[in-house]
Amino acid sequence: MLNALEEAFLAEGFRHLTIGDMAALARTSRRTIYQLGQSKDEVVVGVVDRYFNSMGKEALRRAHDTANVHDQIEAYLSASVERNRRASRQFVHDVENYLPTSHVYDRHQEIAIRELETIVRKAMERGEVTGGSPALWAEMLGAVIRHLRDPDVLDRVGATRSDALELFGRFCRRGLA
């Protein structure tokens, strides 16, 4: 049921959906949908939080499967690249323009920035990165990632969020050397 809701949200957004619509999309009852939350808002926030949480877990798994900082950052960002390829413009718009889901996204982004800081800190300990501090590197990476969330920026440069993150991952691979 959660997978079906996530896929539906990714494909067409969620702001326009009613609990009845969600029940139909998940092929279940309204009562079952209400077991996920006491209101439409709670259901939406739960599904969006689950989406970003699974993205973060996949990013960590990928980063831990690589050896050097360049590959780790590129691998970490690749989880977001792949997930965002499935996200429609409407989903992105709904997440960004609905305060509860925007806050969920912000929280997950802060977690991602702290994870990137940990990756850079370990790389500094191994001598792979010199100069600056892990927190500074992470904040610079985070600033770019936050900027790439802005649909106006992406429209202006003619890129999708996935395209921008993929290019940024390749830039990080070379830029931290």
Image: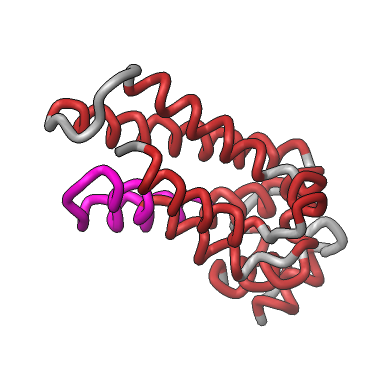
Image coords of residue 139 (percent x, y): 48, 25
In this view, 25 is above or below 81: below
Q: In this view, which residue lies farthest toward the left?
A: 126
Residue at 65% x, 34% y is 103
Q: In this view, which residue lies farthest toward the bottom?
A: 27
Regarding residue 54, the answer to whether it shows in the image is no
- The magenta stretch spans residue 54: yes
Image quadrant holding the C terminus, namely top left
Display colour scheme: secondary structure
Residue at 76% x, 45% y is 153
Is 81 in front, or is 68?
68
Image coords of residue 67 (percent x, y): 17, 51
The rendered magenta stretch, by its main secondary structure, is classed as helix
Residue at 52% x, 60% y is 81
Say left or right for 121 vs 40: left
In this view, 27 is above or below 96: below
Q: In this view, which residue lies farthest toward the right?
A: 16
Is 41 in front, or is 54?
54
Say left or right for 173 vs 10: left
Say left or right for 105 vs 141: right
Image coords of residue 158 (percent x, y): 76, 59
Is 100 in front, or is 150?
150
Image quadrant holding the N terminus, namely bottom right
Residue at 28% x, 36% y is 119
Residue stretch rendered in magenta on the structure = 52-75
Q: How many marks?
A: 0
Residue 97 image-quadrant placement:
top right
Is 30 in front, or is 88?
88
Regarding residue 82, the answer to whether it shows in the image is yes
Image coords of residue 56 (percent x, y): 42, 49
